[in-house]
Image (cartoon, rainbow, N blue to C red):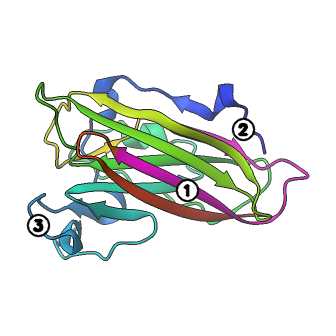
Amino acid sequence: MNCPPSQSLLVDQSLMRQLRLLVLLGLLLAGAAQAQSNFWRDKDGNPVAETDSMKAKDGFGGLLLATTDADWEQKWETPPETVPQFQAAGVVPYGKKVYILSFFSNPAKDDSGKVTVRCDLKIVDPNGSVTHSFEDQPCFSGRLAGKASYVYLSTRVVAFSGDTGDPAGTWLVEMTLRDTIRNTELPLRTRFQLR
């Protein structure tokens, strides 16, 4: 697995670059006061069921995406009214990069108006071996430029590719997003096939 620690953290974006409204894959965030089953909404405002990669708890929402879109950053860096479309990784050939993107919404603010989101990550190969991991890393810290209910891109983006010799099959990505002020964790997972 081509994912040395020095290259795994591809992006540590500035505050303004990460603070864009995201309507990801046609999903919109419902108001924080709504019930958890109604946290995520589609483009028409209808509730969307939670999945392994998209959850909410105690008013905090998170989404995990593995994509092969090499232009993911360019897609994200658009005006807020533009809806970025990301292609989820399905079958990925050896040597092609996979980008692990995490998004969050509605983190709690401390008394000074700052938010703190931390994260853990594990990439697990088809044999059950952890090929890359980090724990309790900053995913966002500071003031939000927009409403808390907007969806924000985490500052922690991981890029890697399967090398010859890596096992073919289903690779698992597990990430826990943690709203430290609210003391709420969201365990998220996504998968892709390496072939």
Left or right, 117 with reference to 175: left
Percent of width and height locating residue 98: 63, 49
Q: Label 1 vs label 2: CA separation?
A: 16 Å
What's the residue type where badge 2 is placed?
Cys
Residue 181 is inside the magenta segment: no
Which of pointers 2 and 3 indicates the residue nearer the eye?
3
Residue under the point 59% across and 60% down:
89
Q: Which residues are magenta?
A: 157-178
Image quadrant holding the N terminus, namely top right
Percent of width and height locating residue 110: 16, 32
Mark 1 or mark 3, which is nearer the start of the sequence?
A: 3
Residue under the point 19% across and 72% down:
38
Which of pointers 1 and 2 indicates the residue nearer the eye?
1
What's the residue type where badge 1 is placed?
Glu
Residue 165 is inside the magenta segment: yes
Q: Quadrant of residue 174?
A: bottom right
Q: Is residue 156 visible?
A: no
Query: Which numbered marker is on residue 3?
Result: 2
Query: Which numbered marker is on residue 44?
Result: none
Query: Which residue in the structure is indicated by mark 3?
Result: 34
Q: Label 2 vs label 3: CA separation?
A: 39 Å
Task: State the SS at label 1.
Answer: strand
Q: Label 3 vs label 1: CA separation?
A: 27 Å
Q: Is residue 112 above or below residue 90?
A: above
Left or right, 70 with reference to 118: right
Query: Which residue in the structure is indicated by mark 1?
Result: 174
Mark 2 crowdedness (10 Å alpha carbons): few <14, some 14-19, many ≥20? some
Task: State the SS at label 3.
Answer: loop
Residue under the point 77% across and 40% down:
2
Image quadrant holding the C terminus, namely bottom right
Q: Is residue 146 visible?
A: yes
